[in-house]
Amino acid sequence: MAPNIECPVLVYDVGGSHVSAAVCHGADYRLGPVFSAHHPAAQTSDAFVGLLHSLGVEAAAGFELVTGATLAIPSPFDFQAGVSLMRHKLPYLYGVDLRQALAGYFGWEPCDVSFLNDADAFLLGEIGAGAARRFARAVGITVGTGTGSAFAVDGQLVTEGSGVPRGGEIWDIPYENGIVEDFLSSRAISGNYKRRTGNTREVAELAAAAPDDPAAKEVFVEFGQHLGRMLEMILAGFAPEIVVLGGGISHAAHLFLPAAQSQLNDMAPQLRVAELQDRAALVGCGVARFNGGNGSPLSVGVGSARTGGA
């Protein structure tokens, strides 16, 4: 049965340190007020599901009917079963049936709760209401502590087919003397700066310092050069019309995008920063919900679990 776009749904973005929630309207993917909170101090699954519930209650206040929830959550995760497979992050959720737990809190049927990969949600959000609108072939790349990726054709997520890396994931593709994530991540930028100066600084600090710190400026230029070369190498077969960048590092795009563009040929896709920024995954949950039916992502060849490093 197709979802009722007149009835909003709860949408969540589960990050590495915090959770955001809002209500999404099906007619135009408009979000209500966004509520966010850090992960609970008590690192238990009960405390985490309790946080999801309390944020959802806040987000849904004033709405007579909310028909369920869709959550964007990192891999590895069994999205069909609603069970976390993460051990290195949020380990207290490992093996927990989040669908059943959250449905119990709200008094819903388990089928009212659905999940999708956070990189997939990011790209779907930008397709539905952001930078990738009206583009037939699109790629989303999120860069922060890790490297997330998603591929789409005509609004449909794809994880296989011509030019699509295995599972739609680029983080572990070999590059130079390592893998993509060794060069496209916050630790890559911080590590490069430490090698140059002996000092350890976070990416946000380096971005703020770049106008007056030649070493900080140069690490972003080098980051952009790697990004451009990797896009040339990885995306040639898929031939996207647009690549949308998200994640924390995208806030410093003015420092690395010119260097990335310099590595691309004249037939390269448009390279843009996400229009929706931190709201993209929330909107993407709504896009998946209202277009796929009860939270099933718009997908082709999607398996039950993804194992990406983002």
Image (tube, rainbow, N blue to C red):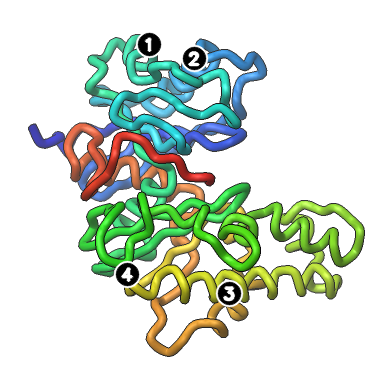
In the displayed structure, 28 sits above or below 13; it is: below
First in sequence: mark 1 or mark 2? 2
How far is disc 4 from disc 2 in space, using C-alphas? 42 Å
Residue holding disc 4: 238
First in sequence: mark 2 or mark 3? 2
The kind of residue tagged 1 is Tyr
Report helix, strand or loop for mark 2: helix
Front residue of 175 and 189: 175
- Please say if the residues under marks 1 and 2 sit with CB atoms less than 8 Å apart: yes
First in sequence: mark 4 or mark 2? 2
Q: Residue at x 48, y 71 (%)?
A: 231
- Tell me where residue 285 sits by quadrant: top left
Q: Is residue 197 left or right of residue 211?
A: right
In the displayed structure, 169 sits above or below 132; it is: above
Residue holding disc 3: 257
Front position among marks 3 and 1 = 3
How far is disc 3 from disc 1 in space, using C-alphas? 44 Å
- Please say if the residues under marks 3 and 1 sit with CB atoms less than 8 Å apart: no
Front position among marks 2 and 3 = 3
Report helix, strand or loop for mark 3: helix
Residue holding disc 2: 50
In the displayed structure, 248 sits above or below 135; it is: above
